[in-house]
Amino acid sequence: MSKPLILISNDDGINAHGIGVLIELMKNLGDVVVVAPDSPQSGMGHAITIGNTLRLSETHDFEGVKSFQCSGTPADCVKIAKGYVLKGRKPDLMVSGINHGSNTSISVIYSGTMSAALEGAIEDIPSIGFSLCDYALEADFSHVKEHVLKIAEQVLKNGLPIGVALNVNFPAKKQEPIKGIKICRQTRAKWLEEFDRRIDPTGRQYFWLSGSFVHQDKGEDNDEWAIAHNYTSVVPVTFDLTAYHAIATLNKEWDI
Amino acid sequence: MSKPLILISNDDGINAHGIGVLIELMKNLGDVVVVAPDSPQSGMGHAITIGNTLRLSETHDFEGVKSFQCSGTPADCVKIAKGYVLKGRKPDLMVSGINHGSNTSISVIYSGTMSAALEGAIEDIPSIGFSLCDYALEADFSHVKEHVLKIAEQVLKNGLPIGVALNVNFPAKKQEPIKGIKICRQTRAKWLEEFDRRIDPTGRQYFWLSGSFVHQDKGEDNDEWAIAHNYTSVVPVTFDLTAYHAIATLNKEWDI
């Protein structure tokens, strides 16, 4: 039996530590092909490159693995992998990450890591985005390896419901091991933006976006709760943004 | 009674024809403030600017309207409007567009127009993205004005369910008038990518992303059906990506 074909991408760029960890782990499960951004793409959401060209070049950074860097976004990487690099072969699994930083809660919508996974799901490829809730460049990934393998194995074995990808977040390394894996819903929360206004040397204003996280959700079935209690969170996510519950409301209330 | 405060943005940039049409219409309903990208941002998805600065400057392009152009993405524009320009005043309505081109179906996930509307919804502002299914720069918007006003008035009057924004698409102008407004769900569809590989003058390869739309959904309650039958489509959308139906499946199937 041939080994599963596993496509890997990320949003921190092909030189990030997290993707190296993921590649080493996935080599245990199948034949790995990497197509990742040539530079960091954090916060790119589901951006794609329209009206501009894409570069793609083979790298030789990972032993025994075909790898390519692309000038585009994470979503572009998945598209060019499927449409060009893999020449029609469909991956059995697409994994993205491991992201340096959390993609729980509302962050999923800004996340390049998760846009790669959702792009995989759009293509009917079972897809997972992995993120470590630790922003340090030198973050320790050693405690998450067992769960990365376990979750990838479950998806290879069972597949995923149609149109569904997984948003997996790991707590930062603590003294005690991670307690387990929780299937969760997305936490209701938002960022409270602050804009730091400054003046450049020519006298013109510019701004730095910063902000703080506002937790709006006391549930114990959400991903923020899981991470805060030292569990790995798994949120099944979809690219169907329809708010089905609102259809009846609009049909009832509106005078159209 | 003071007039409603209406925030306007888009993704085609502040100089696009569509935002001019929207501004003129909204002036009938309230006090308008515009914060829009200084250049086209199509396909930016829900990208935000991290690790880079933002520029913001006042323009005087629209009579009787405070307007600003921003160097960032559509989501950045809404954030800087809320966090800086409006100095704490919360808009009663946020509208984005009118986009030059369709944002039906899976396009919602790549759409800068809709990311501005979803960013408004995250901030609990009733928000609407408007798109015209006509990519021509000189597209005719005359037939959509009545529906833009009608939908905005309904939202000002009734509000929207919490966490819900509207994705509104209009059919391109035809001989007969638009038949009516349909509340819809997002069509299941995808883009089949093709990559046009070329060689630059220095001998290096580059690619143009192109593709064709693959309709995967025979329903008559979706937005593609509505547009094809000359109706305005209204899809309520959410930033909660949780695939709730999959939570039980994973809890049952997985051995974790």
Image: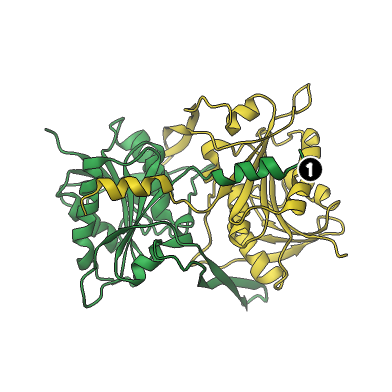
Chain colours: A yellow, B green
When the figure is inspected, residue A77 is found, relative to residue B157, above or below; the finding is below
> Left or right: where does residue A2 sit relative to residue B76?
right
> Can residue A26 be seen in this snapshot?
yes
Q: Nearer the viewer, residue B104 or B30?
A: B104
Where is the C terminus of chain A found, in terms of image quarters? bottom left
Q: Amino acid at mark 1?
A: Lys
Q: Circle 1 sits in a helix, a strand or a loop, which is it?
A: helix
Which quadrant would residue A167 be assigned to in this image?
top right
Q: Is residue A110 visible?
A: no
Question: Which residue is labeled 1 in the image?
Answer: A150
Q: Residue at the location (41% across, 62% down)?
A: B222
Can you say whether B80 is above or below A38 in the image? Answer: above
Q: Residue A68: horizontal and vertical position, in percent?
A: 73, 62
Res. B146 image quadrant: bottom left
* Residue B185, image x, y percentages: 41, 56
Please name the residue shown 73% across and 70% down the image. Answer: A89
